[in-house]
Image (tube, rainbow, N blue to C red):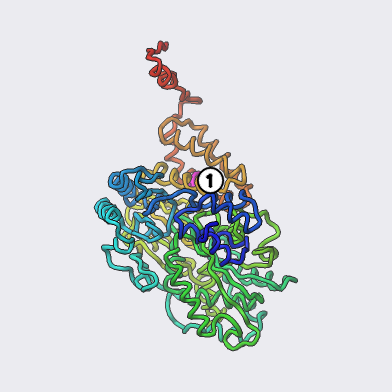
C-alpha cells in the first residue's frame, strides 16, 4: 500500500467528494498518479476505478505518467501567440531536445501546451512546476534550460526582480506584475478590513439582501444576473444547510483581473463571502481557485488564518452570537468549462467538471445537493463596498441599468496592457486611448465567447444594455490576419476545452473549423460562409455557456468582418474538389517502388 496515497485518503476522511484534493496532493508528491494509486483510491473511497480515472482524464494538469522533473506548460492563447510564443516554443524544443507534448529521454524536462494561464498582460508566459515565468524570450529560455540541466530549483531560476505589491511577499514570490493602470471605487482602499462586516452584523439578513438588491449590483462574471435576487432565492430555501462559493476560475482567454484582486484584495473578497454567508444563513464558503493560480494558494490560506485570528471568520464572527462561517479553498486542475457554475460544483465534489442540466438551479440544488450561491470575485468585492457606503452611493456610479464600475483586463496590441477600472457606460474608444492602442483593426470584447467588433463600433459603451463583458478586452492591430491569427486560435481553444458531453458543442466547432481553414487557404466558396452562419446556430441548444458560445468567434467575425471572408472565397465556383489523386497514392507507390500512372 502506498503511504503517500493513504496519507491523502486519511487526511480527507475517506470523503469521495474531496477526490480532487487527494489527486492534487498525490500528484504533487509523486509527480504523477499511478495505476496503483488509482486502485488504492477506488478501494478506500468505495468507488469504481472508472470514477477515479474519469476525473483524472478530464483535467489538463493531471497526468498518469511522469511528466518530467521540470514540467513546462507554455501558454498558447491568442495574446501569447501575438507576443512571440512561437519563437519561445522553438527555443524550448531546441534547448531541451524534445517536442511539445513529450518528455526528454532522461526524464528531466517535459514540454506541454496549455490554454490561457491568466498572464495576457505579460506574455509569452509559462508555468514551470507551477511557478509563473513571464515575458519569455529565446534568450531567457536558453538560460532556463541551462539552469534545469544544472539541477537548480525553480525559484533559483529567477533572474528578474519579484513583482509589485503582494507578488513580492514571502508567501507568493512571483515575478508577476499587477499592472494596475486605472483605479476606481473597487481598487481604492477607502475602508478598513472588517468595517463592512461589523455593519452587517447589526442588520438582519433580510436587510443585507435588500441593500444589495437596491444597489442594482449584477454579476461581474459575464452573465449579469442580479446579485440580490440570487441571494434572496437561496435564503428562502427550506433546506437550512447552504453554501457560498466564490468562482475564481477565470479561464476566459484575455481575463486576468481576478488574479490581481486575489493578490491585492483577498481579505475583502473573503469578507464579501462572509457577508453573503450571513445574508443567506450559510456556515461554509468555498473559494474555487483555478490551478493556474496555485502559486497564490499559500498566501490565500494565510489570509484566511489571519481573518480567523481577527474574529472575522470562524465562531461568533464580529461578536455576533451564532454567526459561524468559515472558508476553504478548492483548487481546480485545469478546465475552462469549470467556470460555468454547475460544472464548478461538480468539480468541487470531486468529479468531472461537466455542466448539469438546469433546472434545478444551484440556489435550489447546488453543492452536495444543497442550496448554493456562486458569485464572481469582483461581485463579492463589490458587496463589501456596498455595505460600507450604501446602495445609493453605489448606484451613483455607472448607468441606470448598469450600476457601479467594471474592472477590465486589457491586453494585445496596446502600449499599456493591464487592469483598468471604469464606470459602466465607458466608451470603448476611450479605453483604446487610455491603453495606448493605435492602428486598431478589431477588439475582442468578452474573450472568445464574446464579440469581435471593428472600428465602426468603437463608439459603443460598456454596459449591460450595450456591450456587456466579463472583463476581457483583447486589442488586435491591423498587422494581424484576423481569420488565421484570431478566429482560428479561438476555435482551437473551444474544441480543446469542450467537455464533450453535448454532441452540438463536440462536433460542430470541428466541422466549422475545417471550413474556416478551407476559406483561409483560398479554397472556399461563397456557400461556405452561409453554411458557417447556419451551423453556428445549432450549438446554441447546448446545455452550458461554453457550448452556447463556442461558435461566436466565427459568427461575430462574419457579422462584423464579412468582407474578409468574401475576399478569400472563390465567387465564381459552386464546388471545389480538394481530392488529390497523386497525393493519395504516393505513400503506397513509394512503398512498392511503383511510379503511378495518372491521367
Circle 1: element type:
loop
Residue at 69% x, 66% y: name it.
370
- Name the spot of residue 527 as percent of width and height, x first: 52, 32
Residue at 52% x, 61% y: name it.
3
Count of marks placed on residues? 1
Tell me: residue 318, above or below residue 227: below
Left or right: residue 310 compared with residue 207: left
Q: Which residue is mark 1?
A: 551
Quadrant of the frame with the N terminus: bottom right
- Name the spot of residue 344 as percent of width and height, x first: 58, 59
Quadrant of the frame with the C terminus: top left
The stretch of residues the image draws in magenta is 552-556
Residue 167 shows in this picture: yes
Q: Nearer the viewer, residue 193 or 394?
A: 193
Q: Main secondary structure of the magenta part?
A: helix
**Residue 311, picture quadrant:** bottom right
Residue 464 shows in this picture: no
Q: Nearer the viewer, residue 467 or 73?
A: 73
Kindly give the residue lying farthest to the front in the view shown. 1
Tell me: residue 40, above or below residue 15: above
Badge 1, how many Cα within 10 Å: few under 14, some, many 20+? many
Is 179 magenta? The answer is no
Left or right: residue 79 compared with residue 492: left
- Name the spot of residue 415 as percent of width and height, x first: 31, 60
Is 553 magenta? The answer is yes
Kindly give the residue lying farthest to the right in the view shown. 238
Amino acid at each position: 500500500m502506498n503511504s503517500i496515497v493513504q496519507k491523502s485518503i486519511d487526511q480527507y476522511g475517506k470523503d469521495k467528494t474531496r477526490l480532487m484534493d487527494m489527486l492534487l496532493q498525490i500528484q504533487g508528491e509523486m509527480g504523477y498518479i499511478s495505476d496503483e494509486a488509482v486502485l488504492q483510491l477506488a478501494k478506500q473511497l468505495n468507488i469504481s476505478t472508472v470514477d477515479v480515472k474519469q476525473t483524472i482524464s478530464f483535467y489538463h494538469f493531471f497526468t498518469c505518467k511522469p511528466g518530467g522533473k521540470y514540467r513546462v506548460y507554455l501558454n498558447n492563447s491568442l495574446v501569447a501567440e501575438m507576443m512571440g510564443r512561437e519563437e519561445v516554443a522553438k527555443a524550448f524544443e531546441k534547448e531541451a531536445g524534445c517536442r511539445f507534448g513529450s518528455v526528454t529521454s532522461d526524464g528531466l524536462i517535459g514540454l506541454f501546451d496549455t490554454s490561457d494561464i491568466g498572464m495576457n498582460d505579460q506574455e509569452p508566459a509559462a508555468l514551470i512546476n507551477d511557478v509563473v515565468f513571464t515575458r519569455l524570450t529565446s534568450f531567457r529560455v536558453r538560460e532556463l534550460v541551462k539552469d534545469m540541466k544544472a539541477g537548480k530549483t525553480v525559484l533559483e531560476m529567477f533572474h528578474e526582480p519579484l513583482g509589485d505589491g503582494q507578488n513580492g511577499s514571502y508567501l507568493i514570490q512571483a515575478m508577476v506584475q499587477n499592472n494596475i493602470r486605472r483605479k476606481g471605487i473597487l481598487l481604492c482602499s477607502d475602508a478598513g478590513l472588517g468595517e463592512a462586516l461589523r455593519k452587517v452584523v447589526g442588520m438582519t439578513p433580510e436587510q443585507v439582501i435588500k441593500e444589495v438588491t437596491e444597489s442594482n449590483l449584477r454579476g461581474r462574471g459575464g452573465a449579469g444576473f442580479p446579485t440580490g435576487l440570487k441571494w434572496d432565492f437561496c435564503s428562502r430555501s427550506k433546506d437550512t444547510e447552504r453554501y457560498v462559493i466564490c468562482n475564481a476560475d477565470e479561464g476566459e482567454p484575455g481575463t486576468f483581473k481576478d488574479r490581481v484582486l486575489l493578490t491585492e484584495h483577498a481579505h475583502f473578497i473573503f469578507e464579501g463571502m462572509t457577508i453573503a454567508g450571513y445574508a443567506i444563513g450559510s456556515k461554509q464558503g468555498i473559494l474555487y481557485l483555478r490551478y493556474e493560480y496555485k502559486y497564490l494558494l499559500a498566501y490565500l490560506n494565510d489570509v484566511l488564518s489571519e481573518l480567523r485570528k481577527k474574529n472575522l471568520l470562524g465562531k461568533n464572527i464580529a461578536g455576533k452570537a451564532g454567526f459561524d462561517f468559515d472558508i476553504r479553498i478548492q483548487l481546480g486542475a485545469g478546465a475552462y468549462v469549470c467556470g460555468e457554475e454547475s460544472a464548478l460544483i461538480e468539480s468541487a465534489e470531486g468529479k468531472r467538471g461537466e455542466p448539469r442540466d438546469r433546472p434545478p438551479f444551484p440556489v435550489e440544488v447546488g453543492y452536495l445537493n444543497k442550496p448554493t450561491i456562486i458569485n464572481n470575485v469582483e461581485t463579492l468585492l463589490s458587496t463589501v463596498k456596498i455595505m460600507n457606503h450604501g446602495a445609493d452611493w453605489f448606484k451613483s456610479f455607472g448607468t441606470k441599468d448598469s450600476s457601479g464600475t467594471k474592472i477590465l483586463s486589457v491586453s494585445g496590441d496596446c502600449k499599456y496592457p493591464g487592469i483598468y477600472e471604469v464606470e459602466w457606460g465607458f466608451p470603448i474608444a476611450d479605453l483604446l486611448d487610455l491603453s495606448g492602442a493605435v492602428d486598431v483593426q478589431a477588439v475582442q470584447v468578452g474573450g472568445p465567447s464574446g464579440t469581435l467588433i471593428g472600428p465602426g463600433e468603437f463608439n459603443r459603451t460598456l454596459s449591460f444594455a450595450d456591450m456587456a463583458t466579463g472583463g476581457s478586452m483583447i486589442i488586435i492591430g491591423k498587422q494581424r490576419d484576423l481569420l488565421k491569427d484570431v478566429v482560428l486560435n479561438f476555435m482551437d481553444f473551444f474544441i480543446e476545452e469542450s467537455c464533450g458531453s453535448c454532441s452540438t458543442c463536440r462536433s460542430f466547432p470541428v466541422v466549422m473549423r475545417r471550413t474556416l481553414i478551407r476559406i483561409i487557404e483560398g479554397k472556399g466558396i461563397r456557400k461556405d460562409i452561409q453554411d458557417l452562419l447556419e451551423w453556428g446556430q445549432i450549438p446554441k441548444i447546448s446545455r452550458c455557456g461554453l457550448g452556447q458560445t463556442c461558435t461566436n468567434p466565427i459568427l461575430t467575425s462574419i457579422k462584423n468582418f464579412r468582407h474578409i471572408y468574401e475576399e478569400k472565397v472563390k465567387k465564381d465556383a459552386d464546388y471545389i474538389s480538394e481530392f488529390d489523386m497523386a497525393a493519395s497514392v504516393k505513400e503506397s507507390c513509394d512503398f512498392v517502388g511503383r511510379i503511378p500512372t495518372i491521367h
